[in-house]
Image (cartoon, grey):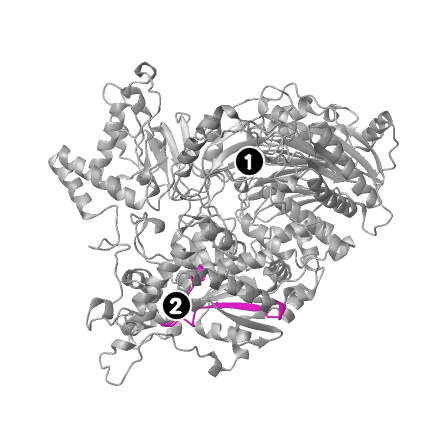
Amino acid sequence: MSAAASSGALLQPKSVKAPFSSLGKSSSLSPSLNVATVASVSRRSARASRCASTRKSVVVERKSFLGSKLRGSAGSERLHFWQSDGPGREPKLRVVVRSALSGVPEKPLGLYDPSFDKDSCGVGFVAELSRDSSRKTVNDALEMLVRMTHRGACGCETNTGDGAGILVALPHDFYKEVAKDIGFELPPPGEYAVGMFFLPTSDNRKEESKNVFNKVAESLGHTVLGWRPVPTDNSGLGNSALQTEPVIEQVFLTATPRSKADFEKQMYILRRVSMVAIRAALNLQYGGVRDFYICSLSSRTVVYKGQLKPEQLKGYYYADLGNERFTSYMALVHSRFSTNTFPSWDRAQPMRVLGHNGEINTLRGNVNWMKAREGLIKCKELGLSKNEMKKLLPIVDASSSDSGAFDGVLELLIRAGRSLPEAVMMMIPEAWQNDKNMDPQRRALYEYFSALMEPWDGPALISFTDGHYLGATLDRNGLRPGRFYVTRSGRVIMASEVGVVDIPPEDVLRKGRLNPGMMLLVDFEKHIVVDDEALKQQYSLARPYGEWLKRQKIELSDIVDSVQESERVAPAISGVVPASDDDTSMQNMGSHGLLAPLKAFGYTVEALEMLMLPMAKDATEALGSMGNDAPLAVMSNREKLTFEYFKQMFAQVTNPPIDPIREKIVTSMECMIGPEGDLTETTEEQCHRLSLKGPLLSIEQMEALKKMNFRGWRSKVLDITYSKEQGRKGLEETLDRICAEAHEAIKEGYTVLVLSDRAFSSKRVAASSLLAVGAVHQYLVKKLERTQVGLIVESAEPREVHHFCTLVGFGADAICPYLAVEAIWRLQVDGKIPPKSTGKFHTKDELVKKYFKASNYGMMKVLAKMGISTLASYKGAQIFEGLGLSSEVIDKCFAGTPSRVEGATFEMLARDSLHLHELAFPSRVLPPGSAEAVALPNPGDYHWRKGGEIHLNDPLAISKLQEAARGNSVAAYKEYSKRVQELNKACNLRGLLKFKEADVKVSLDEVEPASEIVKRFCTGAMSYGSISLEAHTTLAQAMNKIGGKSNTGEGGEQPSRMEPLPDGSMNPKRSAIKQVASGRFGVSSYYLTNADELQIKMAQMMLCLQSTPGCIASLSDSFGIWVPSLVKEVSFLATRS
């Protein structure tokens, strides 16, 4: 299907073959012209230029990819395609480089974006408390890996895995002998390090990589003892793994006497510095083939991994692992399941210090914050100068997965002087905020950590080691399984499931499962398993965290009290009609007096009365049905706020949402804001930050923050309005101005920046608060200054939960919705909010408290839908997708946010703002008493109104549907169908799609008959309560008649419809697909036994994953229900295992 050409709509992708020959090994970036295709260049260019506004265009032509060859020449892994940057622009030839370690492009291409790579896996370890190396440890770990094969995955090639690996302590005796064979002697253990390298397949690039590494090592004072080709056997690998298989070699080297840092820190510095040098030498930073990777470089551990299946790793690929002399006292294994990404050699695990099963939901925010912190990191433990430290940056490689990003930050923390358990506790803290039974000292420890870093939130089982410690921990929700055994013979075994290592029952000393936030830790120096409680008590007592917090932490109430009450009064809002003595109806004291500012910021009658009124009156969000039949913001003819161009993302596949009601103990809206310290240090001053109970601020609190001068904290107000005379250019110019002003304010020592639109007036237009926050946040992140300042929004624009979520999600620390607060108060004057039982009005504080409570709870529900527990993790995480914003807007204000199509530019967004401003402050005099003069707009965003917003379910369409149903009229149904198609084109992207006819018709002999095709049809999951019993039954009968499948929805099904007919045949009213909702409505054993397919719904979305009967036992274990073997397929939304 392709998009229909339409003004302002999507573009029509075309298959355009580039008229160039492939770029060979020696080719430059200048393509050689293929004469045979010259004649068609202009014709194809013209066709490509008609592609409308999708910026991720068109067609990819594969050039010089590896065919049947085992290896290919590096530098030839290129994708050629034509791409148009926008409507009416000349298409250009693009060259996208795919990694030589993976079969996919490194950069976004079409709808593929490697930044979304996530995986879910099997992980485990075997450890000897005695620290005595043995072959049994390695054998048991490899057997564990093979027994968890089902937790990994393979592609359509059964002999190509998603990835498998093992991390072991250096097998000194084995390496000592192989080193002799090569021609050099190894020093004693601890005096040399081993690096495991994935090298380019090209001899020239391989030697260049090794030479650069040798030079860097020597420049740092290390002695390279020698290189060793690692013996491998690729005879059983699938074609995909063979095509991207690297050359694998090991390097042996000694420590440097120049550095005071210990050996592991020296290796960290060497690896980071050498990677920068090798990237430059191999052109990796300028689009070169990424065919170089360091799996590990350590004096304690080594990693063997690859794009393999567990049995390939164990059986034959690495000859080392099968050698009886290859021994270890511990082994950590990992089997990868690429949830929504592609397998590759370098992304196989274990990483350098961890193995990860799970997903980091807040990855984008975590990475952004780490980028911003780079400006403060000194890392004194490494003994580097400021310029030398810069060579180790960035901390998180842009090409790494969520596991790789986590590994990079964890490694930094331990090389900076923190112990491994402490670093893990900092990155994945327990749910401490609402646990009243937690020891106060432990609570203080976690609160101190919260001042240093936001949690890396998401379902995760992390297994980690640095050779000294080996352990595992679960996320605060416990959403990944982890089972462990401690034996009498001194072994510790942990894995994603039991039964992966054979243990005699009489040898079991202790067994159990990891609980949420629990840490299992083996200390090889002390030869003990450290108790979780004792471990955390040890760290909580290591420093006086509680005393530090008492002295340094700033409470908002302290700032409010520090400012005189007279100075906490806000200035009048521009455009407000003052109340007069002769206003006996109190009209101007009500919302009528706020007409101008309300209009200027896009408020409507529905926004006030349907959304905000219930929040102020009942402290809860308004109830409403799901779904939205109004046009997307980019397709609407009305003015839209920038918030409306974003859609919230939600947890899916292996990533479950959480329940904010039942799991309230793990959630928190508290957040530390303001300047941070050096993440690598532990000092009292690190917690000198402002603690907020929630992201919303009252007007009094906002005024206090603007005028504070408290314990070194000062704020600077940045005006985000611009002169009306600047026109459409004013918006982007304003964003540039406030970014520059933010940079200057930080240089002047201000600790809080307030983005305020209070200066709006009849002559000044307010810029979108979301654009302002996004622009400043992204600008300061790039400048490495974001962590040096708090960012607060004082705006009349935000008033809904979605508005608050987008502001916080794109970087705001706190929000003061001052116009919303004033509007709520005036709704009471209008009589919309009933007075108290005493007849007195509610105070403004009481109404605001209810409004904030409803808003905070609404935000918590949004966080929970994505599986995120804390606001600190959600802040800046950008858990949204843009829909209908141009690349110039995304790149400047929302960098990293997915946006599949082009759309509104800055000028278009400014046009909407100017139009709203004109409604509020009209250039012409409005007739007295006219609707424009005395009332808010009511365009019908939620309810259909004549002349208002378009709705898919408009009266004409519904009337034709009713006529067709009641009169069995085919003509009426055709009119209904035609009307819906017209409305669909005006509301949804899918309405712009049309079938593309093939150039060559397919013979009817090659096409299945209609009777076979319809067997693949399924109905939507609609309960009989939603569409009536009659409709529900009719759908089931119809689908059974044609051989398709009907879906019960989440309301169950009448038992009589499942009873067989007297002759034993299936009841034609029986639904083939049975749905199990989170509340298990209507679910019984009889209901489940009468299903061909089960759908288990854990969030309001539908995703069918076909599963084998083998997973039924785990489903029944997880959900506490008996699932019979009769069920053929299981469709589910998300699992907790």
The quadrant in which the N terminus is found is top left
Whether label 1 touches label 2, CB < 8 Å: no
Residue displayed at 51% across by 65% down:
738
- Residue at position x 66%, y 48% in the image: 410
Residue shown at 49%/31% (left/top)?
60
**Magenta includes 751?**
yes
Q: Which numbered disc covers residue 724?
A: 2
Badge 2 crowding class, 10 Å Cα cut-off, few under 14, some 14 to 19, many 20 or more, is some
855 relative to 717, above or below: above
Q: Height in image: 1115 above or below 739?
A: above
Circle 1 residue? 95
Give the percent coordinates (x, y) of residue 403: 60, 42
Q: Quadrant of residue 760?
A: bottom left
Q: Residue furthest top?
A: 1005
Report the side of 372 relative to 1013 (left or right): right
**Is residue 539 toward the left or the right of residue 890 in the image?**
right
Residue situated in front as seen by the camera: 438 or 95: 95
Identify residue type, mark 1.
Answer: Val
Local packing at callout 1 (Cα closer than 10 Å; few below 14, some 14-19, many 20+) is some
1082 shown above or below 152: below
Label 2 secondary element: helix
Q: List x then y, in percent, for residue 487.
A: 70, 36
Amino acid type of the residue tagged 2 in the rendering = Lys
What's drawn in magenta, residue-wise?
747-770
* Magenta run includes residue 897: no
Q: Quadrant of residue 492?
A: top right
